[in-house]
Amino acid sequence: MASDGPTGNLLRVVPEQPVGGDDPIAAVLAAYTRDIVVAVDTTLAEFLTAEVDALTAIDPAMGGFAATARDCVLSGGKRVRPTFAYWGWRGAVGGDVPVTPVLPALATLELLHTFALVHDDVMDASATRRGRPTAHVAVASQHAAAGRNGDSGRFGEAVAVLIGDLCMVWADQLLALADLPADRLLQVRRGYDRMRVETVAGQYLDVLGETDPLSWSVDRALRVARYKTASYTVQRPLLFGASLAGVDGDSELAGAYTRYGLAVGEAFQLCDDLLGVFGDPTTTGKPAGDDLRTGKPTALLVLARELATPTQLRALDGAGRRADEPEIARLAEVVLDTGAVRRIERMIDERVEDALAALDAVAVDETARTALVGLAAAATHRRA
């Protein structure tokens, strides 16, 4: 793989068959993301260093708060959204245009993602993220250790909300640093704003579903997946990248990106549904079985209920937030026995096939096409 470094012409040549490692899917993902991840992380680190310094100058406590927000951004993550945006852009401009002018825009998507994650963890009362305490849990622990007044848990949640808000503001600031003509940046911003609205709408439906899971259908669960995940994980980042290149939203390329993005994005969420029940916490960085404990109406669990025998349905309905690991393992077996897992795996495969068909139907830079084919597999057949 050739590269001109983190701010040069990224990934001009990608090997047809990635080598090394025991996991071929991980190897594919690494082949198509390595350089862009380094470039995005470098952009984020430089930007956030200046922002933390500016807030520290106001008050040392502000600096500590900003540093916590910075750490949430930089502490791991696959940089999936900037990667799809990069290949959406590269697919339009070809292999010889330097990426430097659009790097701030690509990195913006990671700040948006951090905003969503931190708020999502508060709403879901999640204890861990990427194998570490979530922001609200970490801040609550610091509050308790310092012996401060007030409820530590409440303080942690309040600060986490502010961290998410700060990341959203930072995202706006970083996007404005993209070196693009003003009219193009305005067009990019329109798509970016639509992505943010769809993300919030999808999150609302996700929260609403937990209040009345028995009324949820597979179709509605897929609608949540479409807006909560597909939109801001794959579809909108691809279109965001295309708009950075000046591609019109009504073009054939934008149409293909939309079809590919919705299909891969939904498949990405369906894979997440499987990992939420069957994933290894040491790999996913999140506790196993949380969806079973909360009765979250994911497509997997709604489908399991639809396919369940009366005995299996009673078992699934008996799950609760206090369920221990042996009980969760037994419930996971019940889900498997309903046949829902095989159905979800088939739905994933069907969506990947549709995504690849969308790419076949449009003219796109061949290296970008190869990358998007590999990323479709990597994003939907993963362990974390």
Image (tube, rainbow, N blue to C red):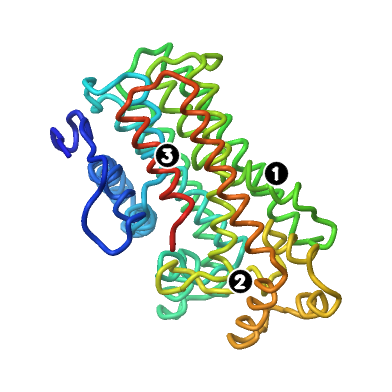
- Of 126 and 290, which appears nearest the observer? 290
Q: Distance between the residues labelled 1 and 3?
A: 22 Å
Tell me if mark 2 has few (under 14), some (14-19) or many (20+) residues whose alpha carbon lies within 10 angstroms of its own.
some
Q: Is the residue 218 above or below the residue 231 in the image?
A: below
| Residue 326, x across and y down, in percent | 60, 88
Q: Residue at x 26, y 45 (%)?
A: 17
Drawn side of residue 370 relative to residue 324, left or right: left
- The answer to which quarter of the image holds residue 43 is top left
Residue position marked by numbered label 2 in the rendering: 290
Three-letter amino acid code of the residue under disc 1: Arg
Three-letter amino acid code of the residue under disc 3: Leu
**Decide: marks 1, 3 in contact (CB < 8 A)?**
no
- The answer to which quarter of the image holds residue 317 is bottom right
Tell me if mark 3 has few (under 14), some (14-19) or many (20+) residues whose alpha carbon lies within 10 angstroms of its own.
many
Residue position marked by numbered label 1 in the rendering: 223
- Of 220 and 271, which appears nearest the observer? 271
| Residue 309, x across and y down, in percent | 83, 73
Q: In which quarter of the image is the C terminus?
A: bottom left
- Of 256 and 202, which appears nearest the observer? 256
**Decide: marks 3, 2 in contact (CB < 8 A)?**
no
Residue position marked by numbered label 3 in the rendering: 109
Q: Which residue is drawn at 75% across and 61% down?
A: 302
Q: First in sequence: mark 1 or mark 2?
A: 1
Q: First in sequence: mark 3 or mark 2?
A: 3
